[in-house]
Image (cartoon, helix red, strand yellow):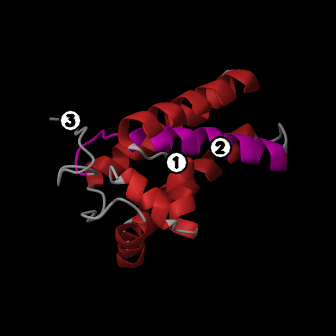
Amino acid sequence: MPWAWDIWSAHNSQHLIDPYTFTHVLHGVLYYALLRLVLGARWPSARALLAVSAEVAWEIIENTNAVIESYRESTIALNYFGDSVVNSLGDVGAFVLGYTAAMCFPVSISVVGFTAVEGALLLTIRDGLLLNILMLLHPIQAIKVWQMGG
């Protein structure tokens, strides 16, 4: 199968697409917004190359032992063993989709889309990009308990 939807399964992060693929779409939206804010409308190709390079670098860093251990300790990814190469490629593709969408649509559509995806992830898997970042940087036990169904 090209996808795995169960975040508690050993298959999570091993297939082309999983629920966390949607967080990489959101990476694309955020990177576009940040680079547009910092660099303005200049050098659109350079901004896109910089963004994709940053996402690929994150995919590499995300699969280091230190980050994998941090995910296991701080988030609900208790059985996370890193992404497969196919999953990383899917994540980068999802990033490009999000970046391209943010580039093509008005800011208001990007904000509504970002909010909708985050909300859907919170409702379906009790996780999302912003919550994942929070838990990696400053773990909160009450949130982890809620994420685990408690």
Question: Residue type at mark 2?
Answer: Leu
Dot 3: element = loop
Which sits in the foreground, 44 or 130? 130
In the rendered structure, which amino acid carries the disc numbered 1? Leu
The image quadrant that residue 125 belongs to is: top left
* Label 3 packing within 10 angstroms: few (<14), some (14-19), many (20+): few
Residue 103 appearing in the image? yes
Q: Which mark is residue 129?
A: 1
Quadrant of the rendering where the N terminus is positioned: top left
Q: Callout 2: helix, strand or loop?
A: helix
- How packed is label 1: few (under 14 Cα within 10 Å), some, or many (20 or more)? many
**Which residue is pictured at 41% across the width and 63% down the height?**
75
Span colored in magenta: 14-38
Callout 1 secondary element: helix
Give the x, y percent position of residue 59: 43, 59
Looking at the image, is 55 positioned above or below residue 65?
above
Residue at point 26% right, 56% down?
84
- Within 10 Å of disc 2 (Cα), the crowding (few <14, some 14-19, many 20+) is many
Residue shown at 22% from the left, 40% from the top: 4
User: Where residue 30 is drawn, which disc sits there?
Assistant: 2
**Magenta stretch prevailing secondary structure:** helix
Q: Quadrant of residue 124?
A: top left
Circle 3 residue = 2
Q: Which of marks 1 and 3 precedes in the sequence? A: 3
Quick one: label 2 or label 3, which is nearer the N terminus?
Answer: 3
